[in-house]
Image (cartoon, rainbow, N blue to C red):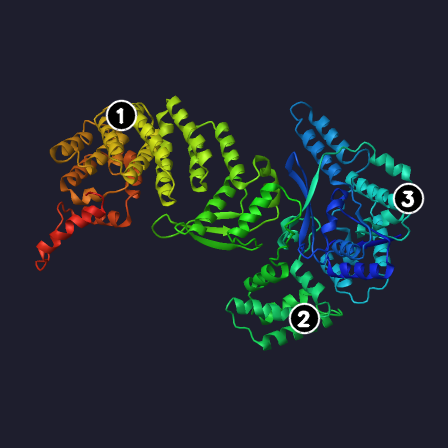
Amino acid sequence: MEVLGIRHHGPGSARNVRKFLEEMKPDIVLVEGPPDADGILQWVGKEELRPPVAILVYQPDDPKHSVFYPFAEFSAEWQAILYARQNNIPVRFMDLPAMHMLAIEKQKREALNKTEEQSEDDVISSIQSVTSGKDEVFVPKKDPISYMAEAAGFDDGEHWWEMMFEQRRNNEGIFEAVGEAMQELRTVFPGKKDRKEQLREAYMRKVIRQAEREMFTNIAVICGAWHAPALKNMPKQKDDNELLKGLPKVKTECTWVPWTYNRLSFESGYGAGIHSPGWYEHLWNYPEDDGTRWMSKVAGLFRQKQMDTSVAHVIESVRLANALAALRQMPRAGLQELNEATWSVLCNGEDMLLQLIRNELIVGNRIGSIPDDIPKPPLQVDIERAQKRLRLAVTADFKEYTLDLRKENDLERSIFLHRLQILDIDWGQKNHVGGKGTFKELWRLQWRPELSVDIVEKGTWGNTVEEAASAWIIQECKDAQTLHQVAVLLQQVIPAELSDAAEFVGQHINDMAAATNDVLELVKVIPGLAGIVRYGNVRQTDAGMILSLLSSMIARICIGLPAACVGIDEDTAISLTDDCTQIEHSIQLLKHQMFIVQWQQCLQQIAYNQHAASMLRGFAVRQLMDYRILQGDELYNIFYSSLSKAVAPADAGAWLEGFLKGSGTILLLDDNLWQTVNNWVKQLDEGNFTQLLPLLRRTFAEFSQSERRRIGEKVKSGTVGTTVKVNKDIDVERARMAIPVVMQLLGYN
């Protein structure tokens, strides 16, 4: 038996393993990995399965609890499996099965959830019984490799390992050296390892013994370097069996999923990650490169970004990198030397450009692929078919799509992406599109490996995206506690074109609206539903159901809102005024005559009700003035009486804030109203003025900059009227002909 201690992802380790296996010619290969996945190793070696890929092991009854086992082309385990498959040699995984690891994690969660039933000491004890048994837990303060790097004069263990193993050319006896080094490290560090590591190594030894019992004589074992001594120097079988006895387990399933270089890096949180997947791919493909090919890639990247880079830059960078390596007594330039040369020569000392190289080349944005005929959950199959049919690229970097909803393919893309969003499969993020109209959407797509888990989890709701999204929305609707929550669901359903779900949610809204006595809750729902009607028209969907809901709800609001405006505090009045502003905009958007008439009647009841909140009365008067229902002497009388000395300054200020909500142009156009406001402010004593100052500031802060400037100029000049200069050369008859067209554009036809 030969034990090959390796680093999980590294071109040097992968090349050494491949070369060793070709010379050894084993009759079975055992690889560190989950035995649960032995059944899907048959796909390795097929052209369609291109790394980076990962084995996904998950619980069918609880998919969010899952584990990934990633592989790159330069992963030692991948090359070992690939060698075995190409040479028809049996290959097996030998790590602790995921069914046990997931079960142990489940026990941890259950122990933590018992805090209400147990004391703190009992909980800690139960967790320790799962994680560490009776053994002492020892966790080194840092990676043990770092100690060897420091002894060799390196500040970084990653850099030391790269120079000693990944870029090393003469690797004779490399695995013996690694085994001796790891044995020494395990001897130097006192104490026991944690329970999980003990279980893993015990199970690895169990698989090795099983292979020996099956009469395999030339066994190749590929494992992480740290485990190598524990597999060479085996304890008694009885001890391992005792350790593995009674392990909990759960049901698991496995499949292959695409992976990305970004998720292979340390920054993603991957424990066995590497700093530079893109660089390691380069070393794997071009092991003899002296830096020339790499610098050519850097130059090519800069040229793509429209930055001038010459051949002379490349030559000088390579020379500088190799000179740095010679000064540091290294056989060849590594990534650190190449980065320093790039920063000096090509980047001119700009760290931002070096970050660009890191993102695009050192880490990279490569994504793997898997065969179509690999067993997958039905929902994932449906999603992949839609991606191909709609020509939506699955990439590891961001890709933007501007969709024109008037085009059939773009409309189908939008529907598909909205359905994924309903399922919380956040492949795409919808962004704001500038300009007028609602026929465009901007989506930014980026595929992440963990989305595979989300797909598996949501697969329980249906075999297709449409079925799953409909079932999910219906269940969310049943669980919703407020009318507003259900209305939000309806806003999600309409762009996703889920007719059955839309009908269910619409009926639920109607039932809840009929049962609720809270008018304020109904008020908050109207703007969203009005937006759905407008959006539905763009998508050529039937908005009749929504109009029916709006008709019923607006009628209830117009009946109940006047009473809801009585006996409320200032904060509620401010909030309700904002909601009424949205209702006003919604009714103007719908342009439905029955809604307008009902709303005007409601405003009249509020405006003349002296017990209603002052701010809402002022708002109602302003809307009635804009509708030309209040004008002339009747308007001025209400205005004067609301700002008279008989009214408390606080109530008068709130009324004025409601009247001027959002626009102060009326004060510039109507001298009588201006003079009334001016006189009211003048008659305030210092105490009342100081008290009302925050309210006045809040009122005028909502005006546009030009309105505030013109009002300030009017106050400063002390003028009452405004002078309009008339150009005598204007053709009055011709100008009069344009008035009907302008009125039609403004909606007053």
Q: Is residue 601 left or right of residue 532?
A: left
Residue under circle 2?
291
Q: Amino acid at mark 3?
A: Arg
Residue 691 image offset from top left, x and y in percent: 29, 33
Q: Hey, what amino acid is under mark 2? A: Gly
Quadrant in the picture for residue 348: bottom right
Q: Residue at x 70, y 69 (%)?
A: 333
Q: Is residue 379 above or below residue 289?
A: above
Cα–Cα gap, marks 1 and 3? 90 Å
Residue type indicated by callout 1: Ala
Q: Position of residue 435 (x, y in %)?
A: 35, 52
| Residue 507 seen | yes
- Vertical comparison of 434 with 689: above or below: below
| Side (left or right) of 237 relative to 516 | right
Residue at the (79%, 67%) spot, across then down: 169
Residue under numbered circle 3: 213
The kind of secondary structure element at disc 1 is loop
Mark 3 or 2, which is nearer the eye? 3
Measured in 3D between alpha carbons, the distance from the residue under mark 3 to the one under mark 2, in whole angstroms, is 49 Å
